[in-house]
Image (spheres, rainbow, N blue to C red):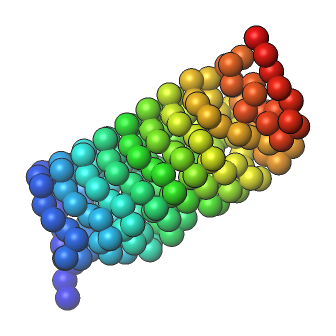
Amino acid sequence: MSRAYAADQSFSAADFTSQTPAGEYDQCTFTGCDFSNADLSNTQFQDCVFRDCNLSLAQLHQTAFRNVQFKQCKLLGLHFEDCNPFLLEMHFEQCSLDLSTFTRVQLKKTVFRACQLEETDFTEANLQEAVFDACNLNRAVFRQTNLEKADFRTALHYSIDPEANRMKGARFSIHGVAGLLEKYGVKLEG
C-alpha cells in the first residue's frame, strides 16, 4: 500500500476517523477536520497548521510533528510520548489538551498560549524555556520535569513541587507563588 504525500494543500471539514491518513503532509493546513480516534501512526506532518480540529484519542505511534501549529484544537487524551522524537516541534494556541501525556518528551521552548491543560502529565519532560501563557494547569503533573527558565507568569491553578523538579530561572508571578508552596500546607493571605 502506497503512502499518501500532500504538499501545500488545504483540507477543510475532512473526516479522517474512518480512514488512515498515513503518509507525509508538508506545509498543509487542516481546518475543522476530525481526527478523533484516528490512527495517525507513522504519519509525518511538517510545517503544518491544524485549526479547529479534533484529534482527541488519536493514536500517535511514531507520528512526526515537525514545526506544527495547533490552534483552537481539541487534543484530549493524547500520548505525545509515542510521537517520533526526531525534530519534534509543536506550538499550541487556545487548545484543550486535558488528560494528555508528555512523559519524557523534549518540549524545549514550546509555547502553550491560552490552553486547557487539566490533568496533563509532564513527568520527566524537558520544558526548558517553555511558555505557559494564560494556561489552566489544574491538576497537571510535574515530576522530575526540567522547568529551567520556563515562564509561568500568567499560568493558572498549577501546583509544582520545587524539590521534585529542575526550576532554576523559571519565572512566576507573585500571585502564583501559592502553587509552589501547596505541598507544605502554607496558607497565603493578602
**Which of the 4 image quadrants contains residue 155?**
top right
Where's residue 134, x and y in %? 50, 28
In this image, 94 relative to 131: left or right?
A: left
Can residue 85 be seen here? The reply is no
In this image, 4 relative to 69: left or right?
A: left
Q: How many numbered tags mark residues here?
A: 0
Foreground: 5 or 12? 12
**Residue pictured at 51% horizontal, 34% vertical:** 135
In this image, 42 relative to 2: left or right?
A: right
**Residue pictured at 64% horizontal, 60% vertical:** 104
**Residue pictured at 26% horizontal, 64% vertical:** 35
In this image, 131 relative to 34: left or right?
A: right
Where's residue 59, x and y in %? 39, 72
Q: State whether residue 28 is above or below residue 14.
A: above
Q: State whether residue 42 is above or below residue 116.
A: below
Can residue 2 be seen here? The reply is yes
- Extreme residue in the top direction: 190
Where's residue 115, x and y in %? 45, 38
Q: State whether residue 3 is above or below residue 7.
A: below
Where's residue 122, x and y in %? 63, 53
**Which of the 4 image quadrants contains residue 161?**
top right
Q: State whether residue 9 is above or below residue 189.
A: below
Placement of the C terminus among the 4 image quadrants = top right
